[in-house]
Amino acid sequence: MNHILINTIAVAVVLGVIVFVHELGHFVAAKVFGVRVETFSLGFGKRLLGIRYGDTDYRLSLLPLGGYVKMAGENPLEEKAEPALPDELLSKPRWQRLIIAIAGPAMNVVLAIGLLIPIYMKEFPRNSVLDQPAVVAEVQPDSPAAAAGLQPEDRIAVIDGAAHPTWETVFLKAAVSVGHPVPLTIDRGGTVIHTAIVPKSDDPSEPPELGMAPKQATRFGSINPNSPAQRAGLRSGDLALSLNGKTVLDPGGLVQQIQDAEPAAASAVLNAAGKPLTLEVRRNGAPLALTLVPALTDYQGTRRWMIGAAFVNDTTYVRLPFGQAVRQSLADNKQYSMVILDLVGKLVSRQASIKTLQSPVGIASATGEAARAPTLLPLFSITSLISLNLGILNLLPIPVLDGGMILFLFIESIMRHEISPRIKERVYQGGFAFLLILMTVVVYNDIVRAVVSKP
């Protein structure tokens, strides 16, 4: 119950801030062009209190879930004086109405960029593996990568049209194509292979499953006392090069190599010593051969051959200067924008599932988790991402969204006259029905996921 309360409060605050900033953009642009703003409300529903200044009623309303701006002449279905009054929206040139429509989404994009800057100045996650070319180190059995025929040391030359991708590109492409084949071009020692991988995911809040790992340095961290690793002379900071002469490509690959080199775990006794293995490491720039004797251990209910050493996480956190934080925020928001547009395109072409989308139910869960973090940085991060999503999706050419108004303005500019209010009414009704059905389906999917995931 405590989590539900925190989730509810967190999503109300986050969505409230995002929607308020969105409407503030419309408000400022309208004022600049002399459009009479009748109401600027913080929240929806019944007016609790407020003040009238000039022509505008600045109010606090009952439901604190954002806000809204009501401009004179904004609703095409309302009866209006003929001709329109000079301070009504429809009396303004189309280019001014276009700027007013764009101002809301633009403010969301500005908010998304601005929120990431203090985060990156405090702690910017740097993972060199994500920036490396997509060279496969490990392929898990019975995984999407195995079904696609990928093998260790394959290089992904093209994924879904993106040439020479990094691992970050691979993971982002997979995130918007869950359940649908993603075309791959593989370079296997000079041989070009065309295939496709189908990412799997039971939870859209988690990264999709691919079943392959990047090629990365396998460096050891802490060494357990009296463990096979300590007895072999392994030290923190050692870099694994090969095991029994076979190159080590990544930490997961080394773990699997150890299992493959030892007897079947089911036939051995717990805590039994395995066969001696030769592990070559690099220490202080020089190669060094060590003899390891793994021990059979019960690890999370599974019998595995272990050496008692942990690996170093490749992610480090650094503080970026202000200028670099701004550039990084711009670059990341640009990349996230391309991912959002890619997802929209795949949804339209039915190359992505609607289950990829999250409703306020799913957003509340993620937002609540961020709110429970010891710092505000995770909450800033998720608010930035949601704000960017809202800004871009509001520009889609769907009636009742800002993009719908922009589309009407574009059509009217070509026709050189206003579209009939009756036609606008029907189109707006259709757009509203479409969004209502879409939201119903997405909420249903989130509720089903929440129920199924309960133990």
Image (cartoon, grey):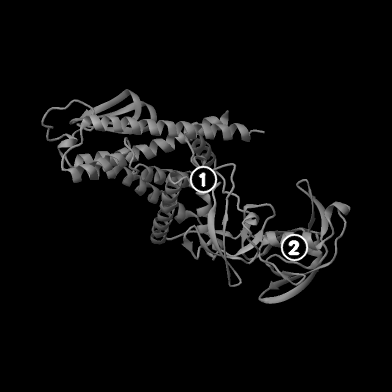
Can you tell which mark lies on residue 257?
A: 2
> Around disc 2, counting alpha carbons within 10 Å, would you say few (fewer than 14), some (14 to 19), or many (20 or more)?
some
Query: In the image, is residue 94 above or below residue 51?
Result: below
Quarter of the rendering occupied by the C terminus: top right
Residue 254 picture quarter: bottom right
Residue 241 picture quarter: bottom right
Which amino acid does the dot numbered 1 rest on?
Answer: Thr
- Residue 6 visible (yes or no): no
Residue 221 location, x and y as percent?
A: 68, 61
Q: Which residue is tagged 1?
A: 375
Q: Say whether marks 2 and 1 touch (CB < 8 Å).
A: no
Q: Residue at x 62, y 59 (%)?
A: 213
Is 14 displayed left or right of 57 in the figure?
A: right
Residue 437 location, x and y as percent?
A: 43, 31
Spatial CA span between label 2 and label 1: 40 Å
Q: Work out whether residue 154 or residue 267 is closer to the camera in this orientation and state it.
A: 154
Q: Nearer the viewer, mark 2 or mark 1?
A: 2
Residue 245 location, x and y as percent?
A: 75, 72
At mark 2, the secondary structure is: helix
Q: Work out whether residue 216 or residue 167 is closer to the camera in this orientation and state it.
A: 167
